[in-house]
Image (spheres, helix red, strand yellow):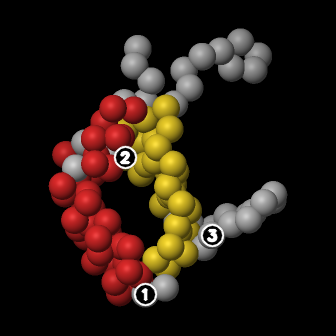
Amino acid sequence: MTAKGYWIGRIDVADEAGYRAYIAANAEAFARYGARFLVRGGPFEAVEGTARSRNVVIEFPSLDAARACYLSPEYQAAKALREPVSVGDLVIIEGYAGPQPGD
């Protein structure tokens, strides 16, 4: 079984209208690469370290799909809309499919 890939994003948005344009533009790339939102904003509690105002976790069928989505022309066009209106951190990471506590 192939491990899934994930984007973990933490974003501070300076211009909500501009950010909405990014959200509309990223839908094409996300649909093409099988993205599924697990976390998309919402209330949160920062119990350690620093936080940003918006948190997102996006699941992809594989790490390769997560990388390909980020590098795609469709996402890069959307990203160009995001960059002037927000600042953030994005990590692309492979999921874990090994033993869990209690297994």
Taking the image as shown, residue 86 lies to the left or right of residue 80, namely right
What residue is shown with label 2? 36
Calculate the distance from the C-alpha at mark 3 to the C-alpha at mark 1.
15 Å
Pointer 3: residues within 10 angstroms few (<14), some, or many (20+)?
some
Amino acid type assigned to the residue bearing label 2 in the image = Arg
- Which of the image's four quarters has the C terminus? top right
Calculate the distance from the C-alpha at mark 1 to the C-alpha at mark 2.
25 Å
Secondary structure found at label 3? loop
Question: Does residue 31 appear in this view?
Answer: no
Say whether disc 1 or disc 2 marks the residue closer to the N-terminus: 1
Amino acid type assigned to the residue bearing label 3 in the image = Arg
Pointer 1: residues within 10 angstroms few (<14), some, or many (20+)?
few
Amino acid type assigned to the residue bearing label 1 in the image = Asp
- Coordinates of residue 16 in the picture (x, y in percent): 42, 85
Residue 80: which numbered mark, if any? none
Calculate the distance from the C-alpha at mark 3 to the C-alpha at mark 2.
21 Å
What residue is shown with label 3? 52
Q: Classify 91 as above or below 55.
A: above
What residue is shown with label 1? 15
- Coordinates of residue 56 in the picture (x, y in percent): 50, 58
Q: Classify 19 as above or below 30.
A: below
